[in-house]
Image (cartoon, helix red, strand yellow):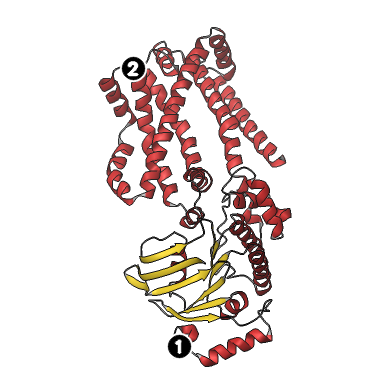
Amino acid sequence: MSALSIAIQRKLFDGREVLGDLQFSVADGEFVALLGPSGCGKSTLLNMVGGLDADYAGRIEHLSGGRLGFMFQEPRLMPWLSARDNVALVCDDPRGAAAAAEARLAEVGLGERATAWPQQLSGGQQRRVALARAFITEPRLLLMDEPFISLDAPTAAALREQLLKLWREHAPAVLYVTHDLREALALADRVLFLCDAPARVLLDYRVPLPRPRAIDGAELAELRAELLARYPNLLSGSLD
Amino acid sequence: MIERLRAESLRLLSLLGFALAWQIGAGFADPAILPGPAAVLAELWRHSLSGELPQHLGITLARVAAAFAIAMLVGSALGMLMGRSRRFDAGLDGPLVLALNIPALVTIILCYIWFGLTEAAAVTAVAINKIPMVVVGVREGARAIDRQLMAVAQAYRLPRLRTLRRVYLPQLYPYLMASARNGLALIWKIVLVVELLGRSDGIGFQLGIFFQFFDIAGILAYTLAFAAVILLVEALLLRPLERRLNAWRR
């Protein structure tokens, strides 16, 4: 059963066609990375799936029952709410939301900082709060738009670990946008390579590595080199 | 806490300094033209005991409160609409500029002529004077709403009311507070004019009588009483509220 199925015919952005004939689906509990040249419409696609952009031709269906998590490029926390209240904000049931939020924050290692304001937290901690917020609704589908960009390497690595741990425990389907091939290979079950606008799926690639995978490990580096040797222009959106 | 105490004592000190300068100045002047603070306080006491001052003060305060509430509600609603929708903004901008520039006196006179010398006409006239300013302030805030934060509310499908209370309005609070501050100061001044022109009670009405009898001590006593009430509202209501809303900024 698929958690998400996408069949888009066309999407215009400022009169320019950013998405072409685009079809794929994501199975329940599957981790799919979406990789493509910058400006190829990855974020636009994520916004469409998340219901933030309804102006397109085609069909997007998710069996998430409305239970959706969304992590943006920026943490996007409400500065006037404490870490706990930011997480509790998106709870369906306001009763018990505070306690549930504290439990989630503890899960991501921020149990002590539940009452801190976002601006008192570091960039990495703010992402942790956003991660706790994304998981508190027990989402069946989690949308992530380069969520760990602009963090230093160790912080980003720790957050990826955290994400994989939560993913294993809660098993949502994940659609993860990135432009970093190593990150995609380290995280995903499947990587969808998109071509430049108008974007289509260029290559649907199942990652053959067992978990856990080290992002700076030899196996991953080898796989990446092999892929790029076979398709030298893969990352700029071409199979030639 | 200590900083707050220091700020409060500085505030008190400056008020005392003002009273002192007044007392010294009054020493050189004819007491009928400029009575000193002691004489004014005595007058204040006399008018309070007779029950006259509390009665007029209460009526004026009720008018201020009513006009303030109407102006803030209507002005905020219009400001949010205009800040949000370009069509509304284009359609209402002309009337808004016009409304901003109509003299208070004209609104008051017209309201009295059209609606009669009634309580409703008085409060409406005051509210109409303030509404355009609230609109301008709140519209500025509504234009500065962070779309990225609104997108969070939309992505997580927050209920409308929760989005309003916890995502949208907190972004408007600084603008609403500024409007409330300026509003209070402006509204009570206009209320006095409205009372002078068309009511038979309230502080404005009393000041008109004192003017006819050249009773400067009476004028100052009433002014002092009202200014004291406004200072109290500032200190006990507006400032604590602002501190609470701004707690996260520290």
Residue at image position (62%, 77%) is A186
Q: In which quarter of the image is the C terminus of chain A?
A: bottom left
The one of B17 and B52 positioned closer to us in this rendering: B52
Picture residue at 68% right of the left edge, 56% below the top:
A105
Between B103 and A66, the one nearer to me in the picture? A66
Residue visible at 53% across and 27% down?
Answer: B230
In the foreground, B201 or B218: B201
| Residue B205: quarter of image | top left
Q: What amino acid does circle 1 point to?
A: Leu
Q: Which residue is drawn at 59% across and 75% down?
A: A188
Mark 2 falls on what kind of element? loop
Where residue A98 sits in the image (x, y, percent)?
A: 65, 46
Specify the farthest residue to the bottom. Answer: A229
Q: Circle 1 marks a residue in which chain? A: A
Please, what is the three-letter code of the amino acid marked with disc 2? Thr
Mark 1, secondary structure of its residue? loop
- Residue carrying label 2: B118
**In the rendered image, is residue A171 in sight?**
yes
User: Gap in Å between the C-alphas at discs 1 and 2?
Assistant: 81 Å
The residue that mark 1 highlights is A239
